[in-house]
Amino acid sequence: MKRRVRFALVLLLALAPAVARAQDFASPWPFWPPRSSLAQLEYGLMGPTPRVSADAAITRWFGLPQLETRALALGGCARSVAFSIGLSQTGAPELGWTSLAAAVGHADRNGGVALRALARRDRLTPLAFDGDAHTAGGEAGIGAWARAGGTFRLWMSAPQLWRDGEAPPLRRSLSLGAVCTAPGAAAWFARESVVGAGGARHGEHEAGVTLGAAGASLWCSVRDRPVRVALGVSASRGPIDIAGSAASHPVLAQTSRIGARLSGGATP
Amino acid sequence: MHAGAFALAAVLAGCAPADRPRLAEVLYDATGDDANAEFVELLNPLDRAFPLAGLRLEAGDGANPGRWTLRWTGSAADSTAAHGRFVIGGSLVTPAPNAIVNLSLQNGPDAVRLVWPDGAIEVLGYGAVTDAGQFCGDPAVDAPSGLALARIPDDADLGANARDFRAAPPTPGRANLPGHDVAVVAGSLALTPEHPAEDAPASLALRVCNRGATAVGAGEAGLALAERMSGVVEPLVATPIDRGLAAGETLAVTLAVPGRDPGKRWLIARTSLAADENAANDADSLLVRIGPGPVEVTEIQFHPAAGEGEWVELRGRDAAPVEIATLRLGDRTSTRGAPPDDAPSLARDALAVLAQDRRALLDHFPGLDSTRVLAVTPWPSLNNTDDDRGTADEVALYEDDGAAADRVAYSARGVPAGTPIERTPEGLWRPSPSPAGTPLEPPRVLPPQRRRLELGARRIDRASHRVRLSWSLPWPRAIGTLALHDLAGRRVTTVLDERELPGRGDLDWDAGTLSGGLYVVVLLARDPDSGASLSATAPMRVEGPAR
């Protein structure tokens, strides 16, 4: 039983790595599993078995060295309440910004819900928080999931339900998704509402499959409008987990991510 | 004898009745207004004077066969000298006619005739006259405006108007085909270069023609060049024409023009020939300018792509302001467009734009100083494609005296569609580095650029919301597009639709419609010749709240 649970969790770790566009706390891990503090901060989604962890990730957007995100997050739990805090910095001076985020919520094997909040300020020099006051902004949102029977789960994420001040680098709306797992494989589908130029709304869709075994997984996803393909791998040994992913684009260079995580506490 | 018998006899023997003066020349369609400028010339071939009393000059209406109307009747005082000419014409004819009358002749197909008191008739029909009574033999050609119908040679009488008369420059009171006449072909003078630099030599090309009936031997005729400036005539060059000229032959001649002081002057070329019978065509002149003109063309939009219409930018070069209203804009045709009468003056180094559609241009470039954008009417439509010589068209600016202030012949080859050409500070012409052009902006020299795509600022200020996007491609031109993507890779907007781009260029773009956020500018370009392609990206932060 213990091995089956572990196997299922490994599969879930690899789910939906690109669902709901990330920005400040993007990571090569999927947002779903319980060990990802970055996912809690980014999407407000909290896994069924939160525990203490330290996560670090680097994202290079579209191959642009001046557009790189470096994120660090800490997660923990007290009784049934889980929480995460994180700091990230994106981009070269003049272009970039610094973000401070926190998330808090509750989850068990049947479902979970979490609130996330983030404060952001542009910066003019490396490693600083020194942008003009008018470049400060904040956002807050919510994420939740629930078991829908058997191995079928539904989830939603609305990371920017509230915004104020300077616009976020990327506007993100509601994402809805479903995942179905089976021994050694998983398939998932998601739809995100997108506000385009001029306020026009449309939907983007993403589908993916994951293949994995204990301690390692390989995943692939495809997104539409425009067609984008992402590939990722992750591996874990004891308390250490590493992952990497690359997402292609028909016009832009690929976006690559790497991450490492150190986690403690009992393995679920 | 019956009048009809006289006419029949005239046709059999020739169109002109013997033993009396005959029609020698008719000008019925003078250049411009015909009133008082038309004439009919008679030539007396006899060795004695011939009275014209009772002679009737009548005009026939080609549209109404048999309809003749009287234009003039000879009085007792009218007479032609032996071998002399008698001109009946309007007051504007030079030299003054022997009999002044506004003839009001109609343009062809029509006819004129002389009716003598004894019933003899000589008729001259021209154009497609159908009434047999309105021509002799076959009607003569219908002479173009400005040319006369002249009997050539003066004693021709070959039994048909078509054989006796041909279109020729008017020569009232003079021989139609003189025995000795060497002329400078009118309008044949051309200076190369058109605007010589100060003290720089130039060459004047022209044509001379032997319009006489007699051949001219080598060295018999001469050619002299002089200039007239501020009313003072100064001889420059004199040389014999060292080649013989057969009757009717034309010869191209080039004269070396020594370096001159700057300024406008007339160059006058004059032929000389002993016994020349027509001095009126011995000389022709050309208004030229040494040194730069008071204005110059600095940018030409000859193929607008966004409905802004064609336009031409000009810059003042004179220390004294130039009145734009006195300038005329032309192309290779004879069209000369005029700016409005209330156009402002153009100071030195100041710019103005002459526009085909002023309103459309101001709509397309809302930041332009509207007082410097002037509509030109009529607009000389500029060609977009090269001819066999590699020239699409030319843009010429003329001063009020007709002198060319500047003239630019351009090629459309290699110029991206929709992109104007501009004059660089070095005086060369190139496609504008800005795809839509830079009206009312001096030409910019774009410095070398290390990256394929660069932004004027990576952070776009929320107040100005403007950003300069510049690119440097490994080809002189390319097919390219500029677009913005968001951080999720979605295409947010198109900055520049796919079009031809100069290899090195930039544009000033208004990002005011964008929501605040982070964007990636993407340049996609391909070389139309080799098919090679590339892409370049640059991130851009736009300040402001989300929308």
Image (cartoon, coloured by chain):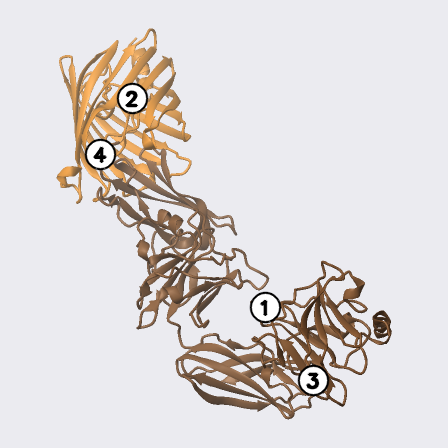
Chain colours: A orange, B brown
Please rate how many residues cluster around mark 1, counting C-alpha atoms within 10 Å: few if below 14, some from 14 to 19, many from 20. Answer: many
Secondary structure under tag 3 reads: strand
Q: Which residue is mark 2?
A: A174
Q: Amino acid at mark 4?
A: Pro
Question: On the same chain: label 1 and label 4?
Answer: yes
Instruction: Please tell me whether residue A75 is drawn above or below residue B531 in the rendered image.
Output: above
Instruction: Please tell me whether residue B103 is drawn above or below residue A32 in the rendered image.
Output: below
Could you tell me if the residues under marks 3 and 1 are in contact, i.e. CB atoms within 8 Å?
no
Q: Position of residue A28 (x, y in %)?
A: 30, 29
Secondary structure under tag 4 reads: loop
Label 1: chain? B
The tag earlier along the polypeptide, 1 or 4, is 1
Q: Amino acid at mark 1?
A: Asp
Q: Nearer the viewer, mark 1 or mark 4?
A: 1
Q: Position of residue B54 (x, y in %)?
A: 72, 77
Q: Nearer the viewer, mark 2 or mark 3?
A: 3
Question: On the same chain: label 2 and label 4?
Answer: no
Numbered label attached to residue B34: 1
| Location of residue A27 by image quarter | top left
Numbered label attached to residue B545: 4
Q: Position of residue B123 (x, y in %)?
A: 76, 71
Measure how far apart labels 2 and 1 are at the Cα level.
Answer: 84 Å
Secondary structure under tag 2 reads: loop
Q: Amino acid at mark 3?
A: Ser
Question: On the same chain: label 2 and label 1?
Answer: no
Q: Could you say which is closer to the camera, residue B471 or residue B237?
A: B237
Numbered label attached to residue B79: 3
Label 2: chain? A
Label 4: chain? B
Q: Could you say which is closer to the camera, residue B429 or residue A89?
A: B429
Q: Position of residue B350 (x, y in %)?
A: 31, 64
Could you tell me if the residues under marks 1 and 4 are in contact, i.e. CB atoms within 8 Å?
no
